Structure formats: C-alpha cells, structure tokens
C-alpha cells in the first residue's frame, strides 16, 4: 500500500493545519450542569449515546418526549431510562465493561446541539425503574451518568446539512425498507414483505 505523504499522524500534525482553538470553545466546557444547560436538556426529545467495548464502538439513538428523555438528578448526575428495544443491548454490554460514554442532544428546530461526556453505571432498582414508567411499561434498567464535561456545539453542522429544513425531507418510499434490506442480506430467505407489513402494529404494541 502506498504511503500517504499528507497523512496526519499526531496532534502536532493537526495543530499545524488547524491552528489555535477558538477562545469561546475553551471557556464553554463545564464539569457541571448550569441552569442554561439544563434548559437545553429539558427541551431535547432525542439524543445519541456513544459507548465503547472490547469489540469496538457503538452509537445508539434514544428518544422520549421532551422533559422525559433525561432526568437531572443533580448538577453532576443524569439518568436515562433504557426503553424497550430488540434486546441486542449493545450499549449496555459496553457500559458494564467500559463505563465511558458520550451523548449528543438534539432539539428539533434548534441549530445548536449539546455534548456531554461522562462515566455510566446501570441499575435495575425497582423503585427507580418504576419512576420512569410510561403507562404500565417500566424500563428494565436505568443508565446513570456522572458528568465529566458538558458544552454546547455551534450550529454549523446542522445549518450545512439543512437538517430541520422541511424542503430537504425525502419520502420514506425513496429508500429500501428494513424488510427489503433483510431480504437482501439473507438472499431471499427472510420474508421482508411480511416483516414490513407487520411492523406498524408491532411498533404500536412495543413502543414502550
């Protein structure tokens, strides 16, 4: 393989082409949640949870109504209910082996995002899990995160992507369905059409 003479292999290489950190980017990083940051968290209905484990990295979406996605316990601690899924539990398997986590909060219509890094633990405390119930659906465990750093991210990425611009939305029919993807993966052995047909009702019954 031909070596890339322009490869960046060290922090010094990076600093040589990127220069100094913008001053505001340094002072915005905090080890605690202040009221202004709390408002961002409370307004967010969606976050992405990044974890690491022996097999590699994982990035998982989490969603709930704004104000119920995350519980702020104190200025250094938050809790996230682990809602019903497909039982792969990739994020949870990673956390019990490597507690480092990173979160990215998004708020519909808002360009800025919120980044949070910390260490997590899992608890199946019955009373705590019950406090996160949606109707009669109780999460099996809760992710508790001790905050190391939290800070806002500027809106450039969302502006460039036009993420919240309705004009950029596409019809779901323009992309393969999950069933079609599964059919392709299994060379036709998986009944993708039946999977897709049953999914709306399955979603309704298993959303929580």
Image (cartoon, helix red, strand yellow):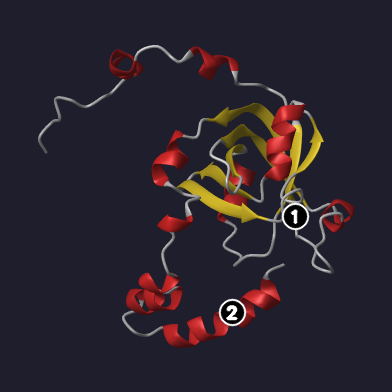
Q: Residues within 10 Å of mark 2 (few under 14, many from 20)?
A: few
Position in image of residue 142 (x %, y %) = 75, 50
Q: Quadrant of the N terminus?
A: top left
149 or 92: which is nearer to us? 149
Q: Is residue 47 above or below residue 15?
A: below
Q: Is residue 96 above or below residue 25?
A: below
Quadrant hosting residue 179: bottom left
Q: Quadrant of the C terminus?
A: bottom right
On the rendered structure, is 8 left or right of 104?
A: left
Q: Is residue 144 visible?
A: no
| Secondary structure of the residue carrying numbered label 1 | loop
On the rendered structure, is 156 left or right of 101?
A: left
Q: Which residue is mark 2?
A: 200
114 or 165: which is nearer to us? 165
Quadrant hosting residue 16: top left
**Residue reaching furthest right?**
127
Q: Which residue is mark 1?
A: 141
Position in image of residue 28 (x %, y %) = 60, 20
């Amino acid at each position: 393989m031909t070596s890339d003479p322009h490869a960046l292999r060290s922090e010094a290489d990076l600093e040589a082409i990127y220069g100094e950190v913008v001053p505001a980017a340094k002072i915005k990083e905090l080890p605690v949640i202040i009221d202004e940051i709390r408002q961002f968290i409370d307004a967010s209905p969606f976050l992405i949870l990044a974890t690491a484990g022996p097999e590699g990295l994982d990035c998982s979406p989490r969603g709930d109504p704004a104000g119920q996605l995350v519980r702020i316990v104190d200025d250094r601690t938050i809790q996230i209910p682990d809602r019903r899924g497909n039982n792969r539990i990739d994020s949870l398997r990673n956390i019990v082996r490597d507690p480092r986590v990173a979160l990215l909060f998004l708020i519909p219509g808002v360009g800025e995002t919120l980044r949070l890094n910390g260490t997590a633990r899992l608890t199946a405390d019955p009373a705590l899990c019950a406090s996160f119930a949606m109707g009669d659906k109780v999460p099996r465990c809760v992710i508790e995160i001790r905050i190391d750093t939290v800070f806002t991210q500027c809106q450039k990425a969302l502006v460039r992507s036009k993420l919240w611009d309705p004009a950029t939305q596409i019809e779901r029919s323009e992309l393969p369905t999950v069933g079609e993807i599964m059919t392709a993966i299994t060379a036709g052995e998986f009944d993708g059409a039946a999977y897709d047909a049953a999914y709306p009702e399955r979603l309704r019954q298993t959303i929580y």
